[in-house]
Amino acid sequence: MSLLLIGALLCFFLFVGFTEIQQAIPKSLLLVNTTFLGIVLEALPFVFLGVFTSALIQTFVSEEMVQRFIPKNPFVAIVPAVLVTAIFPVCECAIIPVVRRLMKKGMPLHIGVIFIVGAPILNPIVFASTYYAFYSTPGIAYARMGLAFVLAIIIGSLIFTFFRNQDQLKWTTDELLDRPIESSNQDLNKMKSVFYHASDEFFDMGKYLIIGAMIAGLFQTFFDRSLLVSLSDNDALSPLIMMGFGFILSLCSEADAFVASSFAHTFSAGSLLAFLVYGPMLDLKSTIMLFAYFRAKFVIGLMAIITVSVYAVILIYQYVVL
Amino acid sequence: MQEERDYNTHAFFRGIILLGFFLLLFRLLVSGDIFLYIAPKMIPFSYFALVILLVLGVMQLWRSRSDNEDELYCNCGFDHAQTGSRFQTLFIYSLFVLPVLTGLWFPTTLLDSSIVAKRGIQYGSGLYSHPPGLPSSEDDIPFDVANAEDDPNDPTTYVKGVDVLADLMKEIEEMKVELLGSEKISMDDERYMDIMNFFSEDLDLFIGKEIELIGFVYKEPDFEDNHFVIARFGMTCCVADATVYGIMSKADEMDSLKEDEWIRATGRLSKIHLYDADLPFLEITTIEKIDQPEDPYVY
């Protein structure tokens, strides 16, 4: 019965053209919608990649396994963690659910944060696209990787200094009561539960992606970028402007280098690096996702630490290297 | 009992939404409209998502019909409907329904000159440009393996990446030499971005060559009356990162050319000094209006 209903509904969606409605929609709204759908459709496969990895970890990786691999001394663990992020070729949409899952299995807070800030930049694909986008100045690509490496260490250490290893995740009542996972029919049930976890997590996280994509779509359509150019002269201010711009645009870290290169005539190398380093670590859509998974106080603290560290490191870099 | 029925309903709605996404993606892939949203190199990932959506959607519907409590509850960190009011639940589901509905109902729309006005144009291309303050590749930072090994990150990965890039760069150099040897350059979609890059790199070498290209008309308020830009949108991953490229030009019968109209123009390349820079300029010999091409974007 219900299946028939669905079928009828879907046919209706597919084949009925609402030309009159279509003509009544203002063009600018259609453009917002195009950008919005573009971001959602592009992110969708990577969100699935993230939630499936997370579901596999949930089902197959035990807490002892996670704890065995992480060095006991919190500071000793930092550098290996940054190196591991360089192997994970994932972008920001996929890393957050994976990190949350690993943290629920006992990964320390500051190591999780290192994954969140490091993985989207420190990977071969992002290096290649940055290198290509700034072909004649390969310094940009090397500097991006180097700065991200240094910043991941700094941010990880700061997080440990401020938050130690407090639990900052949101837990549900069920989890605190430690309700056991299904036990009978081991193998079949395990595969099934991977798919159920993945789908539930998709709905849990997808809503934030959608809100983020919506806001980014609005900005992309209505925000006049020449406003930025008029603020590009000030050496201290322009990195901040580009950081804010990177935050709002919410681009995938594989594509942002090409947008950055379109500003190469107007902004200094330092500001471009600020954009390339800050955007993947923290942007509108990832922030909304972070609020979903972590306590609000911690997310605000994390945002402050990332923002201050990136800005300070960029200023030092501008002063010393450029 | 009531709670259990709630779970059934949730799984049912989730199944419908997942299948809705599946249908949207399926239709976009079949009709080719997907290229108006994301770049071709991302399409394999879309097929992956398509399969996942179908599998998950069907599994959710199946789950919604199950009476087995173990299947309904899921111990993975969500309270489902237990937190939040009916209104909140409704709001969250409408968020998911929104892209499906707008994707299916709204006509697919091309980025147009109103977006160009907001994003600004790359005359030539920013791709190979030199940001102020950094030395160019020939001068200072040699492009070699030794440098890559100094990089603090996993060196082997990056050296491999650089090798692939080196091959790519060689191909591009070969294309440039070939173009410099030919009298007429036709800016087809595959080579559009590369040719634009050559113009911004070494404009002087290309001056005097005959150029043929298509694009849409864009005018800026501060342009002289008969000046306009023949513009294209270039996309890397998705429409969110689309950038505008274009060549300045002028036409006498400007009145008949409207913004966003597609044209095919042939002419001789020269340069114009504008915004403190030498920009490519096309002295048009022939111009004709054309229908919007099947692939309005270059990738």
Image: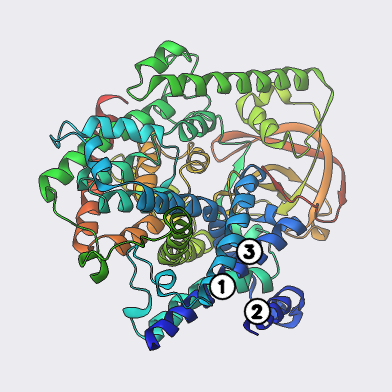
State the separation of the CA atoms marked 2 and 3. Answer: 16 Å
Three-letter amino acid code of the residue under disc 2 = Leu
Q: Which residue is mark 3?
A: B22
Chain bearing mark 3: B
The picture places residue A48, in percent across and down from the top left corner, at 50, 54
| Residue lying at 57% horizontally and 56% vertically, measured from the top left | B52
Query: Is the N terminus of chain A in the top left, top right, bottom left or bottom right quadrant?
Result: bottom right
- The reply to whether the C-beta atoms of the residues labelled 3 and 1 are less than 8 Å apart is no
Q: Secondary structure at mark 1?
A: helix
The picture places residue B264, in percent across and down from the top left corner, at 83, 46
Q: How many marks?
A: 3
State the separation of the CA atoms marked 3 and 1. Answer: 14 Å
The picture places residue B221, in percent across and down from the top left corner, at 62, 57
The picture places residue B110, in percent across and down from the top left corner, at 68, 59
Chain bearing mark 2: A
What number is the disc on residue B61? 1
Query: Could you tell whether B290 is left or right of B129 in the image?
Result: right
Three-letter amino acid code of the residue under disc 3 = Phe
Closer-to-camera residue (B14/A229): B14
Q: Is residue B62 visible?
A: yes
Q: Which residue is mark 2?
A: A3
From what the image shows, is residue A166 above or below residue A66?
Answer: below
| Residue lying at 77% horizontally and 60% vertically, measured from the top left | B258
State the separation of the CA atoms marked 1 and 2. Answer: 9 Å
Quarter of the rendering containing residue B51: bottom right
